[in-house]
Amino acid sequence: SVDELTGLLNRHAFTILIDKVLAEYLRSQKPIAMLLVDIDHFKEINDRQGHLVGDRVLNEVAGLLSGSLRQSDIAVRWGGEEFLVVLSGCDDAEGHRIAENLRQKIEKAPFEANGQRITVTVSVGVSQYDGVELPGQTISRADIALYAAKGGGRNRVEVAAKPGLA
């Protein structure tokens, strides 16, 4: 249930926990925002600095994510250099604010490789669960917003269109 490298939850744990989050949503109707966070130019970090540095960057970004979230939030290692964050009680505007704070924190963090500072940035897509769609659809909308952030120059946050407005 835990990713060995980063210590974050893995996808298997997410599939278990998201059911509980959605059950709470049905009871409380409090919004849920999802952030899809991707480390910019991660392949270049691996190619230039080596995979051990890449692993260290993944671990440090994961630590910044988990250290910046509330205990009720869920942080998941989603894929290679992607992370999914589930924010209960947050709409997409609050999700954008939190994502922007995370983006800035990561950009300012003192990453080092071989005695030199390296800049690490992230692009983030934000979406809000609409109460009807499947969780995978909310994540897909966050992924579309993530691609918009990357297409807009990286190191930025974009909010997904509401379902049916894309």
Image (cartoon, grey):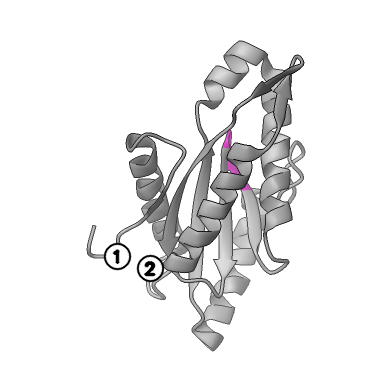
Residue density around tag 1, few if under 14, some if 14–19, many if 20 or more, within 10 Å: some
Type of the residue with mark 1: Pro
Residue named by callout 1: 163
Q: Position of residue 141 (x, y in %)?
A: 37, 55
Q: Where is residue 25 in the image (x, y as percent from the top left)?
A: 53, 79
In the rendered image of this protein, does residue 86 appear above or below residue 84?
below
Which quarter of the picture shows residue 106? top right
Taking the spot 33% from the left edge, 38% from the top edge, the residue there is: 152
Residue density around tag 2, few if under 14, some if 14–19, many if 20 or more, within 10 Å: few
Callout 1 touching callout 2 (CB < 8 Å): yes
Q: What element carries label 1?
A: loop
| CA–CA distance in space, label 1 to label 2 | 8 Å
Q: Foreground: 88 or 68?
A: 68
Q: Foreground: 146 or 102?
A: 102
In the rendered image of this protein, does residue 42 appear above or below residue 97?
above
Taking the spot 75% from the left edge, 48% from the top edge, the residue there is: 2
- As for residue 63 lying within the magenta part, the answer is no
Task: For the C terminus, give its image quadrant.
Answer: bottom left
Type of the residue with mark 2: Glu
Q: Foreground: 21 or 98?
A: 98
Q: Is residue 130 left or right of residue 26?
A: left
In terms of secondary structure, what is the magenta stretch mainly? Answer: strand
Which sits earlier in the primary sequence, circle 1 or circle 2?
2
**Which of the numbered marks, if any, corresponds to residue 34?**
none
Give the residues drawn in magenta, as a range. Answer: 77-81
Q: Does residue 9 appear anywhere in the picture?
A: no
In the rendered image of this protein, does residue 160 appear above or below residue 72?
above
Taking the spot 60% from the left edge, 12% from the top edge, the residue there is: 48
Residue named by callout 2: 133
